[in-house]
Amino acid sequence: MATTDLPAPGIVGKGRTRAARRPPTAGRIALYVTLTVVSLLMVVPFVWMVLTSLKTPVEIASQDAGLLPEHWKFGNYLDALKAAPFATYARNSFVIAISHTVLNVVVASMAGYALARIRFRGSEVIFYLFIAALMIPTYTKVLPEFLIVRFMPLAGGNDILGQGGSGWLDSWWALIVPGAVTPFAVFLFRQFYLDLPVELEEAARLDGLGEFRIYARIMTPQVKPALTTVALLTFESSWNNFLWPLLVTRTDSLRVIQVGLSIFKTENGPQWHFLMAGTTLATLPMVVLFLIGQRYFVQGFATAGLK
């Protein structure tokens, strides 16, 4: 009588083996513990910020106060919004951040595509100049940019030589134009466009598409991780910018939310309950945006690190 051979344990289907679950090693356990501790350390300041925003001034000043509020003061948020024109500050921050994001994504992606896919004389030199620009510390550029804005010809009462007026100071031009494009965005887009297959480009040309349509309809949809990464980083940098808006604006109508938070730092010391409430509200947009685009954001950084 013929016997039927039964598949050995671990064999599934035609020759496929199911990998046995291996117990975690000591090194992997140590890694998980380390990552958990680091994650908690990073979350603690945000938790403290939110809990402090719900305390009374007396409780914050008390040395015996615990982490949790004794009396949950949700009214601190409404009082903080009434203490300053935060609706105007938030509107200004949104306008500037969205303008920077759109301009940076569009212009930097065009520049990155040109440097990656179009061969022209001097392209390598231009790319090296972008790399050099990445090495310049941010705060060393503040004074030259301020002087350019201040002495902008034929703006704000200035003559053709940039004298006699205030230039772009205290205007939307000063808040938007200097941060419109970043070298990092151009570099990141170039790296992504370089990795795309040449066959896509050649097939599009055979179909009669021009260079701009190849960039917009064929190549750019393939680099969604780069688009999301640049958009999130640009929005975050613009939304949290404090020094530049403080330097180039004088009126409340153009103040941004980060500058507006300084109203809670009085001569008698910071009003911590209002300051923490305002900071929590200012942090929420970035948390929501990251949660929405975190998959492409992480993928963008991981992919860029492999190029």
Image: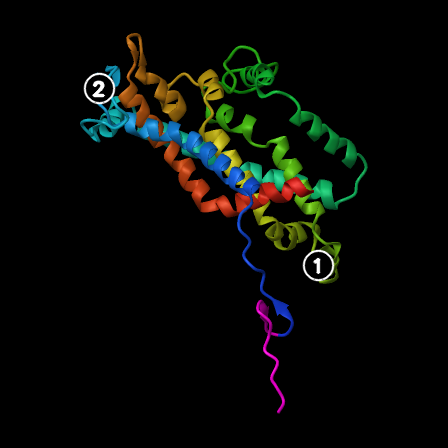
Residue 10 located within the stretch drawn in magenta: yes
Position in image of residue 51 (x %, y %): 29, 29
* Residue 204 - label: 1
The dominant secondary structure in magenta is loop
Dividing the picture into quadrants, the one containing residue 54 is top left
Q: Quadrant of the N terminus?
A: bottom right
Q: Residue furthest left?
A: 71
Q: Is residue 133 above or below residue 305?
A: above
Q: Residue at x 65, y 71 (%)?
A: 15
In primary-sequence order, the first of circles 1 and 2 is 2
Mark 1 touching mark 2, by CB under 8 A? no
Position in image of residue 254 (x %, y %): 40, 24
In-front residue for pair 93/8:
8
Q: Residue furthest bottom?
A: 1
Identify the amino acid type marked 2.
Glu
Residue 8 located within the stretch drawn in magenta: yes
Circle 2 — which element? helix
Between the C-alphas of marks 1 and 2, the distance is 67 Å
Tell me the magenta residue range.
Answer: 1-13
In-front residue for pair 7/209:
7
